Image: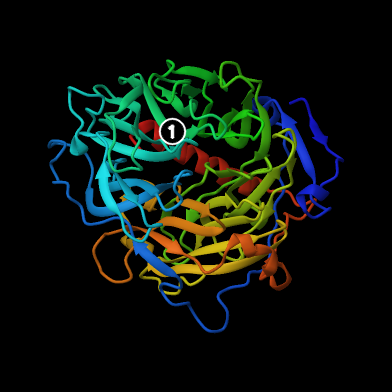
Amino acid sequence: MRGWARSTRSMSSMRRARSMRRVRFTGIVGGLALLAACGGGGGGSGSGSGGPPAFTSVTQVKVSQPTTYAADCAGTGQVGTLYPNTALEPSLIINPTNSANLVAEWQQDRWSTGGSQALNLAASFDGGMTWTIGNAAFSICSGGAASNAGNFQRASNGWLTVSPSGVVYALSLSFSGTSLEPGSASGQLVAQSSDGGRSWSLPVALISDGADFFDDKGSITADPNDSNYVYAVWDRLEGGAGSGGPSYFAMTSDGGTSWQSAVSIYDPGPSNQTIGNQIVVLPGGQVIDIFTVIVVVSGKQVSALGQIQSSDHGSTWSAETGIAQLNSVGTVDPLSHQEVRDASLLFSVAVSAQGTIYIAWQDSSFSGGKYDGIALAHSSDGAQTWSQPIQVNADTSTPAFDPTIAVAGDGSIAVTYFDFRNDTNPGQMLTDCWLVTSSDGVNFEESHLSGPFDLDLAPHADGEGQFIGDYQALRTNAGTLLPLYAQTPASGTQVSSEVVLAFPTVSVAAASAHTQRATFRAHAAPRGMRLDAAAHERIAAHIRQVQGQRLNRGR
């Protein structure tokens, strides 16, 4: 590590608290060995004396629908438990040429051993009130065959983006078999729609691998400054002892007519890997790939958020630099002690019109390594320096997970997440979805979206716990917030989950009016408090668990 550098530049343009420190660390792999992590705690606002809120506090539209896929649509003999009528892990875009046109993507019919029967796609032309469901041929169940690129048993990790001209691109991790095992295969596939999501092209394989590699956790980003350019990134896991997982990249410079061959753009070295790669593009054209890097230090896995940059549309890339250490211990239900498959080791990122980058993630530093809260950091200088992470979930006495961030045109911030504050029945996993908004990054107002719903009715991910997605979706549309997320139904006893679009009454465009009546103030981990050895071991154990599960089977 070449050291921590503290910036003294003014933050007045960001309207941020003067006490927030801006920091930079470089050389992630070496630097993680020297980082001193901080932790803290704090009281929470709870749900108030009136008891749990109503199940649905805002208008909701159910986007997913009952399955149309037969249990054997991809053939028989697959390993694992199939959960029909489960929908989870959504992505969402708003067409910049028609704000009433929304497109969503999600996993449909999840398997306990990773992936789903298919990725469903849906289009709305009335602002999300009604939807038409379709799909692309990302797996056999949705039209994949030996005659096209989609001849895979399962699909996962759907991701959407849209170009300034309104062309929508959908990405899929498609795979067959247990990852890195003989006979397995995987690929990153992209399809596009020029009619607002009504119809989709046959997919193109950006990469297609056999059993020696597994192409995991992709994302796709259309360049907001030029409709010709679209960028896709993922981690390519290698089989064998001591193998790693570099960041891979593919792009088109002609609006999807052709795609550059996939190339490695960052390799953290043997036994190390990246995960969760996402590209953001700044107003000036700088392309930034942000990722979690997992490295082995003194025999233990540690993780951090890092980034590389390109000023020539991804032809060349800078050396890696660090953003923040990532100290997630994962989510466990406080009453039942059941695990949750969540967004730990991942993050959510958004860029304001002014070019400020915001990142939200799960981190246990605020509780001294006991459980995760929602951390938020930002950079207003092109990712050269970053603010000290602050905690933005309102109730800090309970685990919070799956953060999703969006930024409005005026720079106001919104974050959604789940927590267990109303988890009062040991026989269930009662979970709520929440929204916090802020115009200054210090004072936040919290709103309830839905819950408590029973997360125990969500599909189970073998060895990891209940699962509604590694990520959810949140967009702004002319100041209106549009959270798209998964939940279990309000009633029922069968395993089931649905993707819903919520219409909160809170508007980020009016967030400045909320500052004077903010529910809570965000806070940083107390200075001088360090995570103890037990906390570091919990963090390392969680990384080992997640990393091992990803290497041993499909996602």
Colouring chosen for the image of the structure:
rainbow
Residue 215, position as x, y percentages in the image: 39, 27
Residue at (26, 69) in percent of width and height? 492
Q: Is residue 88 above or below residue 504?
A: above
For label 1, count other residues whose C-alpha is less than 10 Å away and answer few (under 14), some (14-19) or many (20+).
many
Answer whether residue 415 is visible to the viewer in this image.
yes
Viewer-closest of 167 and 107:
167
In the rendered view, does 184 fall on the left or right side of 101? Answer: left
Q: In which quarter of the image is residue 191?
A: top left
Judge whether 36 appears above or below 88 on screen.
Answer: above
Q: Position of 423 compared to 22: left or right?
A: left
Could you say where residue 82 lies in the image, as x and y percent from the top left?
A: 22, 47
**What amino acid type should be assigned to the residue bearing mark 1?**
Gly
Give the residue at mark 1: 218
What is the x, y in percent for residue 272? 54, 26
Can you say which quadrant of the picture contains the C terminus?
A: top left
In the image, residue 449 sits, relative to residue 483, either above or below, namely below
Front one among 55 and 11: 11
Q: Can residue 462 be seen in this view?
A: no
User: Could you tell me residue 206's position as x and y percent?
Assistant: 38, 22
